[in-house]
Image: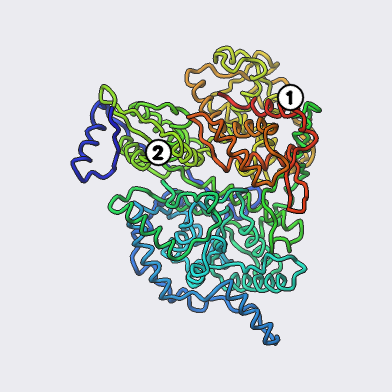
Amino acid sequence: MSEARLHTQQRSSHGGQENSLWSSGFGTKLEAVTPFLGKYRPFVGRCCQTCTPKSWESLFHKSIMDLGFCDVILVKEENTRVQDVLSGRAPGGAGEGRVPDLMKKEVYRILGHIQAPPRPFLLRLFSWVLLRFLNCLFLSVQLHKGQMKMVHKAAQAGSPLVLLSTHKSLLDGLLVPFVLLSQGLGVLRVAWDPRACSPALRTLLRRLGGLFLPPEANLSLNSPEGSLARAVVHAAVEQLLVSGQPLLIFLEELPGVQGPRLSALGQAWLGLVAQVVQAGVVPDAMLVPVAITYDLVPDAPRDVQHASAPLGLWTGALAVLQSLRRCWGCRQACIRVHLAQPFSLQEYTINARSCWGSRQTLEQLLQPIVLGQGTVIPDTEKEQEWTPATGPLMALKEEDQLLVRRLSWHVLHASVASSAVMSTAIMATLLLCKHQKGVFLSQLLGEFSWLTEETLLRGFDVGFSGQLRCLVQHTLSLLRAHVALLRVHQGDLLVVPRPGPGLTHLARLSAEVLPAFLSEAVGACAVRGLLAVRVPPEGPWELQGIELLSQSELYRQILLLLHLLPQDLLLLQPCQSSYCYCQEVLDRLIQCGLLVADETSSSRPACDTGRQRLSAKLLWKPSGDFTDSDSDDFEEAEGRYFRLSQQSRCPDFFLFLCRLLSPLLKTFAQAAAFLHQGQLPDTESGYTEQLFQFLQRTAQEEECVDPNLAVSAVWTFRDLGVLQQMPSPAGPRLQLSPAFASRDSQERLEQFIRQFICS
């Protein structure tokens, strides 16, 4: 058998030889894969109807379904001219009035750290260079015209635009401003992270519209330097919003940085915007969730040791040249820029507070159940804020800090929900979750089409279309460094994921598919937890289908898993109750055919909703109010039972769903097993490194080890009360809590986690 590499463009005899590999052995006609269900493609990105009903209605473009895409890198030079856009729109200074010369000089010094007036000639030159770079590196940069229409409509309302984006690549901060500039929205000011840029690069980015927080802004509230810096930053943001220039804030941490998903710096900027709106300086601000998806991210995540190293001008130029040299003449990857429906910050602030209910820590919710000291789950939501408050955000009131954090989760949920699933993510998911040992290409073609259709059925868009064989060929050519293609007898090809770093790369790509199947994956793992104590894990599917699962048991098991999984993964909307999500999970399991109602064990059919007794509480309870206990409202759930469906496709689909969450859950289980081996007390970073090395030593050949999962395990165990953070002269250090000091309690924790894992 010889290994074959696939290329999309055939420019030589080698390309013709590879084409013969594809054409041999496939005599059947393959259908085209299109991102449509029926006549229309699924629309994604509607704002929350609970928190922003007026925006949901007024800012939606009625004919969005009829509008197609435009390729941004096909714009002409006239699309990026900016002289008229800049006239009269540059923000002013930090304030007026008579101040001492020394104070004025200090204010100008701090203001120089934050921003600089954009230079039209430099903007045009840089836009031209970036356009050439994108044309050399990417096949297309797609933008939905209907989404752009909604943003234009929101901009015409008169309120400043604040775009809140995910952060997949360092290219994002240049790509989004270029896209919006080419679409006539004006010069976008970008809130950059100073840690990512050298001083020379910061100077250039400020001239292109970049904003940076000065170092003094992170000093304590009692520091006079910090107070002055925060005052200047606040005034600069006021002038920026008053001038009407759009602002881009990244809500996620830098690519490659380990730790919580939400960016403390992004929340600091968002907190400043919220302060300006609440103070009445501007009546409102329109928030636009943004997401960027790549076939392949152009800059791979940096090593842990170099994650905090700033990017310099020469380093960046060298990286660009290397990318051009590597990709010259073989543009293959595509980018999709997503702009979700804008919504009013003022409207969200008013409505969101009414949805806030009581919350408890993960330790209060789960620890008694894990240790066998209780069985009842408290009827409250989980409080899990994985973002340290820094600098300007600390100057907010506690209630406003909570508002900013929950708004960030809300927007991040909207951004992820509007992201298209790329073909590389579909392929990586199939190879990791269904065919880790390899799969024949003839079978892979059909499963690629199946997973694409299942993704569309769940309301998620996909970032590709075309003939199935060409799509799979193109996708495998993009993944050629991580996938081996072996020619076998009868002209077929065997597709095998490469071990080691290749598996880790595929795992990161497959994470883009998880949001589309997250509800079903949670439900499948919860069902596995229920069956784990009744049926041996290796028992046949028919034997497992005999077991009756009551609705109340399913609710309880889903709740346990929801509390265990980190908020960074779930991205639940803060206005959504956990009990509502439990019902959504159960509905999804029924809709996808995994669960069927058992009518014989209930006095009336489970689908008979017409005769359900509504309690008095439900009759008067306002919509969205989940502060009271809902346990009494599920009394009738005791009489509803379900079985696993016996359809032939169900066992494979059930295993596929469970494997979507297996990497995280297996890491948590391994972290529980490591508790008695770890050297404690230790710093958080030190113990995380200990755990990561343990995971690498114990990983099997087909398993990938992701350092970010190790970080999630340590943070979750800290919230659960397994690890305690104790002060010391050298700084905070982790140690085992007394509740989990014994081997018995550690084994209980491991067993609790492993019940959700399906091998």
**Residue 133 falls left or right of residue 509:** left
Visible in this render: residue 628?
Answer: yes
Residues 391 and 393: in front is 391
Quadrant assignment, res 468: top left
Tell me the amino acid under the disc marked 1: Glu
Residue at point 75% right, 66% down? 221
**Residue 309 placement (x, y as % from top left):** 53, 58
Q: Mark 2 — residue?
A: 482
Q: Earlier in the sequence, mark 2 or mark 1?
A: 2
Q: Which mark is drawn over residue 620?
A: none
Quadrant assignment, res 465: top left
Tell me the amino acid under the disc marked 2: His
**Residue 314 placement (x, y as % from top left):** 43, 65
Q: Which mark is drawn over residue 636?
A: 1
Callout 2 secondary element:
loop
Picture layout, residue 635 above or below residue 408: above
Residue at point 50% right, 54% down? 339
Callout 1 secondary element:
helix
Residues 313 and 157: in front is 313
Residue at point 30% right, 38% down? 5
Give the CA distance from mark 2 to mark 1: 51 Å
**Residue 512 placement (x, y as % from top left):** 50, 42
Q: Residues within 10 Å of mark 2 (few under 14, many from 20)?
A: many
Q: Are marks 2 and 1 in contact (CB under 8 Å)?
A: no
**Residue 184 falls left or right of residue 273:** left
Picture layout, residue 752 above or below residue 683: above
**Residue 633 placement (x, y as % from top left):** 76, 31
Residues 140 and 346: in front is 140
Which label sits in the foreground, 2 or 1? 2
Quadrant assignment, res 565: top right
